[in-house]
Structure formats: C-alpha cells, structure tokens
Image: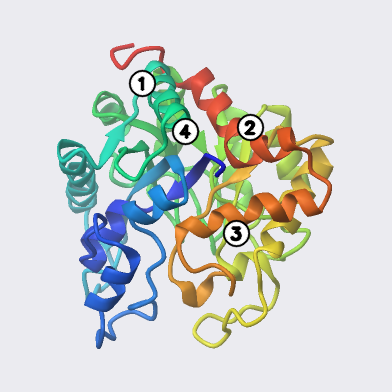
Amino acid sequence: MQLIFDGHLDLALFALAYNRDQRATVAEINAAETGMTDAEDRTRAAVSLPALRDGHIAVCQSSLAARVAPNSQPISRLDLDFATPEMAYASAQGQLSYYHALQQRGEIRLLRSATELENHWQQWKLNPSDTLPIGIIVSMECADPILGPWQAESWWEAGLRSVMLAHFGHSRYAAGTGVAGGLTTAGYALVSELDRLGMILDVSHLSDESLDQALDHFTGPVIASHNNCRALVPGDRQLSDEQIQRLLERDGIIGTVLDAWMLVPGWVHGTSTPGALSLTAVADHIDHICNLAGNSHHAAIGSDIGGTNHMPGDFQTAADLQHLGPILADRGYSHQDIDNILYANWLRFFQQWLPETASS
C-alpha cells in the first residue's frame, strides 16, 4: 500500500465544532450522529485517525480554523465566525490544544522541523501499522486568529508552520473566496513578518488581487494546499492557469481537493449529489497541473475531506485516497510520477522549508 502525504485536513475543527472524537472509526462517528440534523453532513463523516491509518496517510497538514466577522450572528458551534479577534484567537488556541492532547495520547505527532518530519516518515516507511501516530504539520486557515503581525512569532514558536491570509469573505488581512479586494495595511505587515519568520505562505482561498499582491510581496516558500483548476471549473475559488504558472515559477506545490463543487462545474450546494462523480475527476485536475508544469513535480493531494454528501461517489473514507494511484497509472503516469503526487512533492517541499530543528 502506498504512503500518502495529504496537504490539507481540518481534524481539530471537526472534533470541536462537530463534537467528533477523531480517535473513533468513521463508522463509530457516523453511528453516534444518528438523528442529528444541525449539519447536512451529519452521519456522513469520512475522516478520522483510524481512517488515515487505514489509508497509510502518514502525514498531513491540519488546520486551525476561525474567522472574525463582527456583524455575524452564529447560531451553533459549527460557525467559524467570531465577533472579535480575541475570540477567534481563543478558538484557534483551543484547536491547537486539541492537537497537543492527541499527541499526549500518542495518536498524532506534531511535526515542527525537517528532522522531525524525516524521522517520522522513516518510521512509517519501515513499518507502517495501525498503531503509529499520524504526523501533523499545523496550518492556519485564515489568519484572523493572529491578533497582529507582532503576534506571529508566538504562533511560530507554538508550532504553526503555514498560514492562509483569508478564508471565505474578508479577513482582517486580505480578501478571500467570494469577495474582491487586496491586502490590507495589516496584511502587508503580516506578510512581511511571515517572511521574516520563515513561515510558509498558503495562497488557498485568496481573491485574485490578494493572491497577486501576496506573491509580489512575499519572498519565501509558497503553496496552494487545497486548490483546483479554474480552466476545468469556473470560479474564484479555483486557480487560473496564470496563477498556477506563478506558483510553478516559485517551485510551489498545489494540492488537489476532493470537494465536489471544486471538481465539476454546476454543483449546487444542498441539491446536487455525488451520483456518478468519481475520483477520476480528481485526476483531471492533477492532469491539468502536470500538463502546465510539463512534469509531475508540483501536483499533490490537499483533500480537504468533508462529508461524503459532497465527495466523489466512490469515496467513503480517507482510506479511499489509495484508489488515486491506480487511476493515475491507468492514465500512463509512471511509478515515480505517482509517488511524486501522492507524497514525494509535499515531502520534498517541507523537508526543504521546515526549520532543521524545532528550535531553529
């Protein structure tokens, strides 16, 4: 079975917002949600730590996710929006604490350095098993929990290694999915501080203008942890060919997403169902990135696994990421190409850009 490195998951968010014990199996999580109606994907969970082990997903980036929206009126714990930066900070700190608690239980291993990543990967490579911890590199999906550029260093010291400036809508630092606009004054200052620290900039979710400005201003390592291709599915959540080329020029990695509305055009939230949609659509986006690059060195997986109600019909748990290898082989990808896409590109990138040691 192939080892896999997934560029984007939201394990802590699902645990704390959905009250899902990520140590349970997917079947156990879904059984516990029987009769719950507060979210469309209740009883349709597809990710948990046992599912990741079943799929030999040895390492993933997993997020801290919270936003600031002073005028929002959240009605449940599922909402990401908070009235103040301090509240968003507290929520993200809670998610980070969840990762620390899982680490203390031996369920995960927080990877802050290239050395820790290499040692963890070798352990999985030599003896993969259903008892090994999952390696997690902590990312932040929307920078709102960073109270100001002055606080970014404390997040770095706490183990944060990559940052998205915005999510859906406007953040305090940039414009995100569904809105227009560029970086704010604070956004430029934060980008400079992330650059100084050696933080990885993740351009996922940025508006076109914000993405261009961020890439113009930031000189360090860049990724798009979970993005698909606008040439195949129109919309500002996808990367245009020009944006992909800018990332290729920076030696960036682009993780392809499994969310159905990003895989095929015309998906209607709450109405469309997976139907005949299959993981071959994921391969279509990988193909497009590889064709633009002229090689397989920049395409990867950033699954963003959510509920099976908006995942491909042949995808039921994280372990089904294993099906991507045979799909790519059927399209003529070599063993090395498949290795690159399923793990080696992310592994190479993070080995290069994580600090050598955790104290670096």
Instruction: Name the foreground residue: 146 vs 132.
Output: 132
Q: What residue is pinned by disc 4?
A: 188
- First in sequence: mark 2 or mark 3? 3
State yes or no: discs 4 and 2 in contact (Cβ < 8 Å).
no
Give, as a three-letter code, the residue at label 1: Glu
Q: Which mark is residue 227?
A: none
Crowd rating for badge 2 (residues with CA inside 10 Å; few <14, some 14–19, many 20+): many
- First in sequence: mark 4 or mark 1? 1
Give, as a three-letter code, the residue at label 3: Arg
- First in sequence: mark 1 or mark 2? 1
Gap in angstroms between the C-alphas marked 4 and 1: 31 Å
Q: What residue is pinned by disc 3?
A: 237
- First in sequence: mark 4 or mark 2? 4
Element under disc 1: helix
Instruction: Name the foreground residue: 122 vs 10.
Output: 122
Residue at 38% of width from left, 45% of height from top?
62
Element under disc 4: helix
